[in-house]
Every structure is written in structure tokens, then in C-alpha cells.
Amino acid sequence: MLSDHDRELIDNAAKSLLENPGVRVEDEQLVSALLSRGAKPGGGPMDVRFPRAMVEEYLGMAPESFPIADRRGNIWTVTPEGGPLFWTGAALFYSDREGFRHIKTKDLGNFAKVIDSLSEVDAVVGTSLEDVKPSHRDFVGLRIMAENTSKHLRTLSFTPKGGEAMVEMGKVLAGERNLRDYPVFSVGFTAHGPLRWTSLALGLFKATAGHGVPCTVNGEPMSGATAPVTVAGTVTVGTAEILSGIVINQVMEQGRPCFFNLGFAHVMDMRSGFAVTGGPENIMLAVAGAEMARYYHLPSVSWMCTDSLHFDSQNALEKAMAALAHAQAKVSVIWGVGQLESEKTISPVQAVIDNEIVGMTRKYLLGFEVNDETISLDEIRKVGITGDYLQSEKTFKYFRGSVFEPRFLVRKQRSSAGERDTLKHRAVDYVDNIIAEEKEPILSEEQKRELKRIENKYRELIP
């Protein structure tokens, strides 16, 4: 999407913004640390100007690739060249057979249990929890997710102290391995722009630094609101925010793994004031973000979104287009599995539907081999005119890998299909069965006790 010249223009403009006016850094200790390492005072007491040479020096400390792990023995190496991995997303609300509501602990546990069963989803992202005190939701959520899935865990953060709790819990989950080599969880935070890092974001970065825990550095500008209305202007503001966040993280922990994340950027519908997440501009922002991440030799993140409130055709259109476009752009990690309603709601039913979208996307991106064996010229001659390949040895040899085999999509004749032979109904039934199913515990009793001990400790420490 971006030419070399485009990337150079954006890079130059973003670094120019970091020099003037700079970025607000709402942490006095960190402001002092930045100034001692070459930053310059800005126009306000917490405003910091980042000289170009400093940005480039500290940006060079962030690794180009790094591991992401789950507790199934998988360790992926994330790179700027994509993959991609598909994760769920943060949310406030929950939608399932029982209706629509604020997410509670039981819902997050059930959602994680469903995700654990889906082959195309690689991680579960934390959510809000209505029945947990706000300042405790991050580490309580981590414990709930860990009990219900062995996939990678990406936490939300509500207090800096909660970050400390999650590091302790992460060490329990990693077992005898250290988090730097076996990062079973990751963190991240967003610049509350334009050009501003809050004390909460910086507190989380500090609380989780020093352990090699991967950190997603989010620029989340909104075109027309917290960034210029043009896509190019939005990319520029977001890039400046992300670069400053990566520099800050490298000052705290040299070599800390960081994702460059412009893929959460929004667009404001100027007629209604609505924050659009499923439009073509969102896709352009995500693709541009991946290309800028590669320019800086960093892995990228995006969010495949829909603004639909239901499991409908708008939902399918927006989710499928985003999944394919982001994956083709080589985004490293794509969020949004199970999400609807402009990132505000998650649903296990939607997650099952998205599992099919992701599966089809990955199959498409694999392409197909072209060689003498796969062309099968001798076999074509052998079968000849008007023959068939049903009994062919090559059919038996290759059919499983050659054709995508969906788990839930409907492939039936109308005459044999029943009332529940729709993708939505199949997804609903699957979710019901998975939640009702008794499964072997994911955590050992010792791990459960230790996570609960850490949780209780921080419930006392954090007001």
C-alpha cells in the first residue's frame, strides 16, 4: 500500500513531531530518566522532546523477532513478516444464547474454554469483569483465563500494581522456564492521544519491565478526532505515539520485545460521531501499520473488526475482509476473534464463526504447489478423456491437504439440510456442548493454589 517514498515521508514527519512538540509523559521519574538519556524538555513540565538520534538509537534496541508461547508446548517466533497469529479481543459486554450483558467472571471462563477448543485461535485476551472490583480485574482475569485455556494469554491492565501481580502469576504458569524464553502471557497499553502517555500506561510498562514480557505499544488515533481526518495524518500521529512508547520501554528494559501497533486506529463518522472500526479506512490503517512496522523492523498488530451488533451479513463482510486484508499485509498478530459491536462485545458464538473465517484465510494464504508431482501429467493421460479421479492413488494421497475442510460451514444439499444447518445455529450448538463438557483440569492443584494466593495477596494490597 505504501511506497518507499511514502514510508520515508511518514517516518520523517513522525520523528519531526517527536522533536516538536514532543510527547507528554505523565511520570516524573520517567521524565527525568528520558532527559538523562538525551531527551529535551518540552513546552510543559511533563512534555518531552525526543531528538531523532535518540529515537533511532533506542528503536534499534527493540528486537526484530521474539518468542510468544502457550502452555501446550508451542513457541512461535513473531517477526515483521507476519504469520499471522489470531487472538481474541478485549471487551465490556458478552453475547450468547442467554442474551446480552456485561461480562462476568463466569462468562470469561466459558469464553476461554470455547477458545481452547478452536484450532485456528492462538490466544485469549482479557476483558472487563463486571463482578470484580475494577482495580483487581487484570490479575483476577489472568487467573480465570489460565484455569480455562492453555493458549497464550494477553492481559488487560487496570493498575500498575496489577502488572506486578500478573508477572508473579506468569512465573507460576511458566513453571521451571523463565518468562523471557517462555512468555506465556503478554501485556500492552495505548497512548491516550494525541501524543500523550498516561501514568497508568507508563506504570504498567514499569511494573512489567525487566522480565522479557512482550509488550504491545498501541497508537490508537481516531481520524478526525485525535488525529487529522486524513489517513496519512492519522498514520503519522499514531507512528509518533508508538515510536515514543517503544523508546520509553527500551529505556526501562533494553531489548524488551515490543509490538508496533497501529492496527487499532479508528475513524470518526463525522455525520454521527460514531467511532468506526469495520470500514475500509480501518483496513488501510492496519495495512499501513504493518508496513511501517516492517520499516522499523518490528512485529505488528491489528484488529479485525465489525461494527455490526449481530451475527449477520454485515458482520461477515467486515470480519472476512479485514482478516484476509490484514493477513495478506503480513500483520504479525491479528486481534478480534469473537468480537462484534465495534470492539465492545465478545461472543463465543462469534468466535466459532471467526474460527472458520481464519481457517479459510490461512488456507488461501498457503496457496498451492506447482511441480511435476502436483500437475500430475502422467495421471491425466492415464485417466484420459471422460474418465474420473475418484479411484486415483493421488486422490487418496493428497485430498486431505488439497481441500479446505470446515468444521462448521454448511455443505449440504437443501433436500438433506435441517433447520439448524446454518453457520449460526451450528456455532450456538457447538458452544453449548463445549461449555457443558467436563474437561481435565488445565492447571495443577499446586498452580491453582499459588495463583489464588497471589490473587488474594494483591486484593489486599490494591485498594
Image: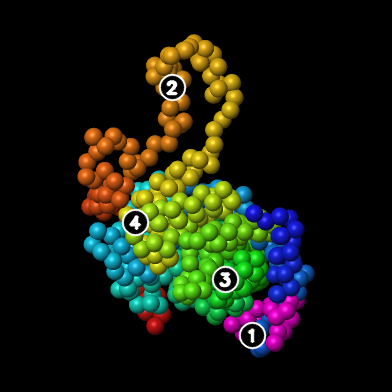
* Mark 4 crowdedness (10 Å alpha carbons): few <14, some 14-19, many ≥20: some
Tell me which numbered mark, 2 or 1, is placed earlier along the sequence: 1
Do the residues bearing badges 4 and 2 touch, measured as CB atoms within 8 Å? Answer: no
Q: Disc 1 and disc 4: Cα gap in Å?
A: 46 Å
Do the numbered discs 1 and 4 sit on residues whose CB atoms are within 8 Å? Answer: no
Alpha carbon of mark 3 to alpha carbon of mark 2: how far?
52 Å
User: Label 4: which residue?
Assistant: 311
Asked whether residue 305 is in view, the answer is yes
The residue segment tinted magenta is 19-43
In front: label 2 or label 1: 2
Determine which of the numbered discs, if any, sits on residue 46 in the image.
1
For mark 3, what is the residue?
Answer: 223
Residue sitting at x 72%, y 69%: 13
Kindly identify the amino acid type of the residue bearing the numbered disc 4.
Phe
| Residue 21 on the magenta span | yes
Amino acid at the residue labelled 1:
Met
Label 3, secondary structure: give it: strand
Q: Which tag, 1 or 3, sits closer to the chain's start?
A: 1
Mark 1 or 4 closer to N-term? 1
Say which element carries label 1: loop
Q: Is mark 2 on a helix, strand or loop?
A: helix
Amino acid tagged 3:
Ser
- Asked whether residue 163 appears in the rendered view, the answer is no
Residue 350: % across, % down: 35, 55
Disc with the residue nearer the chain's start (4 vs 2): 4
Which quadrant is home to the C terminus? bottom left
